Image (cartoon, rainbow, N blue to C red):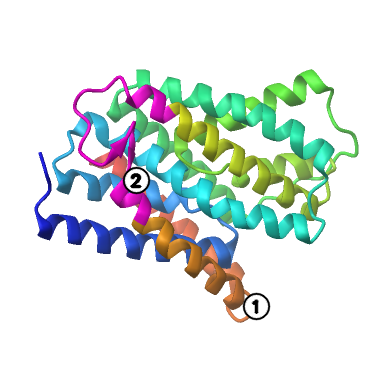
Amino acid sequence: MPLSVDVFLSLFISCFLLGAFAGFLAGLLGIGGGLVIVPTLVYLLPLTGISNELIMPMALATSLASIAFTSTSAAFSHHKNSNIPWPLARKVALYVAVGSVFGAFIAEKLSSEMLTHFFAGAVIVLASYMLMSIKFSATRTMPNTAFFSVVSALIGTFSSLLGIAGGTVLVPVLNYFGVNIRYAMGIATVSGLSIATFGSLGFIYTGLQQTQLPMFSVGYIYLPALFSIVLASLFFAKLGVSMASKLPIVVLKKAFSIFLIIVAIKMIVN
């Protein structure tokens, strides 16, 4: 069923504002936009007439696709600044890619309600971690390859199921195993690009099996929302970076964490 002009414009403007907000936060706080994009799309997509069972997988897929665009520039920036130890980054990117595809297939098998509860519960945990600013003492030895490949794949699966780049989880894990925080963030941008790209491809493949998808969708990715989110986030991420030295980042990060917890609780209740 084609959208009316009014609904299409409302969706485009809403997603543009969403992209601006998510991009600004990503640049300002170093937080992936998926934690904001997914719950907002869960509220916006039903306005287009998309059935409830498709809302959550489409929100996750569209979020991942937008991250694939925005994380590319971040990865180039970290590479330019020599923040990426490529031998380790390549291994992590490979393992998380495998996990992200697996996550897309898991999402296809779960009901929209189960996905919503999983997302909301995970967001509460991640936001609480950011709120409390928990720090771990770093060990100075990396685990063996088999163990680390499993951990990386699980992070990829977890991130794909949340529609996020995974840096919120990967950076503290790498730092715990003795990776310098600057290198950990560089590796996380490469891995986020890998998660977003391969997770999106997984959602495209599984979505092709659906017969009730709306117009302008590729698999579970909804192109009108994707285009407007990316259009705004690429610009506003740079603005967020430029404002990072002028605003109280610690206070803003804690306030954002509380905001995420409230949103997640509301998703569970509804």
Nearer the observer, 168 or 194: 194
In the rendered image, which residue does mark 1 sit on? 245
105 relative position to 98: left or right: left
Q: Secondary structure at mark 2?
A: helix
Name which residue type carries label 1: Ser
53 relative position to 31: left or right: left
In the rendered image, which residue does mark 2 sit on? 265
The answer to whether residue 266 shows anywhere in this view is no
Q: Secondary structure at mark 1?
A: loop
Q: Position of residue 203 (x, y in %)?
A: 41, 29
Region in magenta = 203-227
Q: Position of residue 74 (x, y in %)?
A: 63, 57
Mark 2 Cα shell of 10 Å, populated few (<14), some (14-19), many (≥20): some
Q: Relative to 257, is 249 above or below? A: below
Mark 1 Cα shell of 10 Å, populated few (<14), some (14-19), many (≥20): few
Q: Position of residue 89 (x, y in %)?
A: 76, 39
Lower position in the chain sequence, tag 1 or tag 2: 1
The answer to whether residue 87 shows anywhere in this view is yes
Q: How many numbered discs sit on the rendered protein?
A: 2
Name which residue type carries label 2: Ile
